[in-house]
Amino acid sequence: MKKFFALLVLVSALCSISAQRVNETVTMFGKEQITGFTINVDNAPANIVADALADKFQNQYYMKGTAKKGYHVYENQPCSAFGESRYDIYFTTVTVGKKKDQTTQLTLVVSNGNMNCITFANDPRTSRNIVTFLENFPADVEAYKVKLRIAELKNEVAKLKKDRAAMEKDRVKVNDKIGSTNDELKRNTDRIEKLTAEIEKNQAEFNQTHNPALGEAISKSVKEKQSLQKTQDSKQKTLLGLNNDIVKLNKKLEENAKTIEAKEAELKQLEQQQQK
């Protein structure tokens, strides 16, 4: 094991083959020692780098892979980026460096089969193609991040619009309640005014005649008026609450519209960037 790590350090130190930090390195696939090419990809976590490469292989080169021993594996598949042959391709990503200076290390191994790994020593032409592929790959990662953000924004905008539709329905319902409450208040007000007039009329007549029937009518009208006034107070509180609900809904709808506008602007910008 000590010899292996010494070899790894030696190869990493001596076999730098690109200004873009691509190195020919020795790594392990299970218990097997294999040689591949490694590049550090900044500004993206290991899972995003891995997903970006898997996405590129699938959508650009129509390759289907499986997971094996911590690697994404593509067995006996063509990849025009490397050459005209069919290859066994393995890649893995790990996070390296201290917390503040962490980066993602991508290791790509290309084999002609039977773990016959391509290196500069046995196939310089294909090795240069692999290096070029890796040199260009950080840009693919950025493009993949844009793709993810576009999908995320579309989902966010769709949810915001769904929320907006729900809030608009709520606003219609609240406005309907405000309308019906105002109608009830008006009916109650009209009834209270009629009762007041009846009470005043009957009271004036009762003061003259002291008719018991008028006294009972006055008492009944007073009780009804008091009940209606309590109802009015309750309806006024309800109306105040409904009006506050409308104010809150309008504020939320305004914020929702601004958020949608901002996200749609970002989405448009990213889609334009993606098309370039």
Image (cartoon, rainbow, N blue to C red):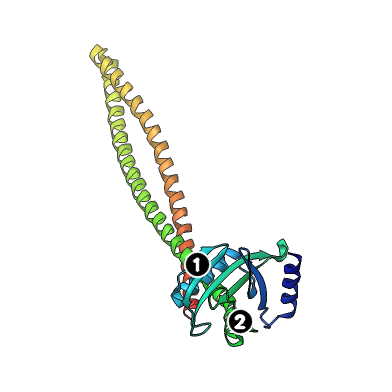
Name the kind of residue labelled 2 in the image: Val
Q: Characterize the local packing of mark 2: few (<14), some (14-19) or many (20 or more) Cα atoms within 10 angstroms.
A: many
In the picture, the quarter occupied by the N terminus is bottom right
Q: Which residue is mark 1?
A: 148
Return the residue nearer the eye: 114 or 185.
114
Q: Position of residue 177 (x, y in %)?
A: 34, 43
User: Label 2 vs label 1: CA separation?
Assistant: 26 Å
Rendered residue at 52%/74% (across/down) = 88
Q: Residue furthest bottom?
A: 125
Q: Is residue 185 above or below residue 143?
A: above
Q: Nearer the viewer, residue 215 or 69?
A: 69
Q: Quadrant of residue 207?
A: top left
**Reading the chain from its start, which is encountered first: label 2 or label 1?**
2
Foreground of the two, 165 or 2: 2
Give how far across and how far down residue 129 sits, in percent: 57, 84
**SS class of the residue under badge 1?**
helix
Q: At which x and y percent is residue 76?
A: 48, 75
**Residue 252 percent across, percent down from the top left:** 46, 53
Left or right of 184: which side holds 31?
right
- For disc 2, the marked residue is 131
Q: Residue furthest front?
A: 114
**Crowd band around label 1 with a 10 angstrom C-alpha radius: few (<14), some (14–19), many (20+):** some
**Secondary structure under the numbered disc 2 in the rendered image:** helix
Which residue: 63% across, 81% down? 119
Residue 135, above or below 192: below
